[in-house]
Amino acid sequence: MQTKEKVKTHKYGGRERTSNMGEFLKSMYLSGRLTGGEVQEGAAAAGNHTDALCKKLAKAGNTGSHRGNCHRDIMTALDQGCDRPPVYETDIWFQDARTKKRVKKPCHFLLVSETMDHFVGKTNIEDWVGIRDNPHLQSTFDTWCNKVGLNPKDTDIMAMGLWGDSAVISVSESLYIMLANCLSGTHRKRFWLCAFGKKLVCDCGCHGRHTFDSIFKVLQWDLEAFLSGERPKIRDDGVPFSESKRIGDSYRHKAREANKRFRARGGVIQKRGDWSWHKSALGMIGWRGEGATKRCCFKCLANFSNLSFMDFYERALWRQTLLTHEGFLADVEARGGYQSEIFNLPGFTHAMITADLMHCGDLGVLLYLLGIVIWEIAREYGASYSNGQRQLDHVLLMIRMASKALKQKKQPLNHITMSMIRCNAKSSPKLKVKASAARHLLLCMRWVLETFTSLDTPHAQKRFLVVKNFCDMYDSLQNGEGMESMQSATINCRKALILWNELRQEDIDPDNADNWQTRGFFLWKLYPKHHLLQHVLEDQILVSGNPVGHWCYADESEIGAAITQCPTLQYDHLQKSLIKKHRLQNYKTEETA
């Protein structure tokens, strides 16, 4: 008998406690905690006085022409109790590890149209449609509906988002994964689309784009069916389902014969991810500077030369170069650049490519700011790069006092070392902490600056105001309501960045006795991420709404859960085995907005 109490089995989530041996082994296997052989051994050791599933697992590896394949038999046994649509198999351009050539290999997908139809059928469609409390996203949805020929007032249309990223599995391999989520309604669960190892990404000189484009073509076919609301009759490769021998295609032919219509229609109106993903998978402009002007922004023409990305004022020249979808396509054509297949998704536009607050802010600008402030405070107490641990321990003590005074549930930092702030004696400061810890630490640093440091110099006052304005920005985004709070966050962000630039000017001033040349490294250095954060808070907010509502914490948790499963699978076949294994997990849709 199962209870509702949850037990944290690994850092990315939990499983429901159970007294059923078969369900226990199943959950441990599907979460990547046990291999197939270990599950079979555990089931066999449990004896004959167990449940039916456990008895089936005990026999794993004893059937088929190839004995000993426990993974195959366990997957077969678990599949019998799964009511989700089967995986969709199609060929994708991958890299052959042996020949080093581009080849087509099978890859498994969980189709958006089928997944949404399945879960809508298990709940109420009212829980999946309708944009809630987000007028800017509602406007984007209405525009998308008009573009693809739908009536936004129809009660069966779902607004979807996509997310993609990679994460390290081991020293020799990484994992790419793509997820979908519903932006309308109340359910915010992430749904896996496909996953594959980095070694499989095409390396013919295309920068992996043959692989990503072939995946987006499959999504285009799937989303066109989802938009029409009708189950497709023909596969993405042109083969009718009635004639296909691929996995699951017989089910799809029978499902269409039984009911041609999906329970809902919809499409993608948002693509999330960090800048690195947008650059590699979508061909967006990178942060290092491209072309003659060293352009460094994919939302406007800001660069390192005549349209400086370091100009944060309202009169900045780059503001006149914000890219529309048509302007983006014209710019790509003029540069002879790469245009991703993602722009062939129904109604998808350049404005829907979303920069993430977590990566731009929490893991970007905040880490630079915290590193700088901690270093400056430690240096004021006499720290140097080679001899500063005592001063850093003193700063840590002040942070702990601040955390206690602010009644935070958890200390944001357990320790500070010089390597956590600076990689070497010539590097600019950047703190190494996780995203949520950075936001909590920001509040602590504001308290520390107010309580323990002197604010009687212009530099100290500007430093404090940078921290204060970023604190106010996050407070407005997380705790405020309505357009006024977002406008306040925008103003706070702009003030903080302008003050940062003033501190940078002091750092490069040749008349300043403590400038970067005397010191040997930059302190208040500006990066293109500062500029992108301003886009998130000024123009992107008009497309997607409050960035806190769609930051990537939930997506990062999913890729973390995927990573835990990989060591029990063969890396050469992750593009098939990982999705097939994930499909068997007991999905919960109770996660709401």
Image (cartoon, rainbow, N blue to C red):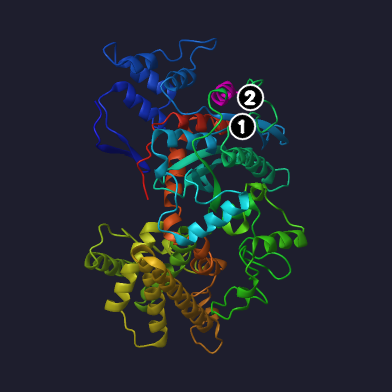
Q: Which residue is mark 2?
A: 241
Q: Which residue is mark 1?
A: 232
Q: Mark on residue 49?
A: none
Question: Looking at the picture, how far across and down is residue 151, in whole percent?
Answer: 55, 50
What's the residue at 55%, 35% (across, down)? 111
Quick check: can you spot residue 375?
Answer: no
Q: Of the residues shown, which amino acid type is indicated by label 2?
A: Phe
The secondary structure type at the circle numbered 1 is loop
Q: Residues within 10 Å of mark 1 (few under 14, many from 20)?
A: many
Q: Is residue 188 above or below residue 492?
A: above
Residue stretch rendered in magenta on the structure: 246-256
Residue 558 belongs to the span the image colors magenta:
no
The secondary structure type at the circle numbered 2 is loop
Residue 252 belongs to the span the image colors magenta:
yes
Choose the circle earlier in sequence order: 2 or 1: 1
Q: Is residue 184 left or right of residue 111?
A: left
Is 592 or 368 nearer to us in this picture? Answer: 592
| Snapshot quadrant of residue 310 | bottom right
Question: Looking at the picture, how far across and down is residue 196, in whole percent?
Answer: 57, 37
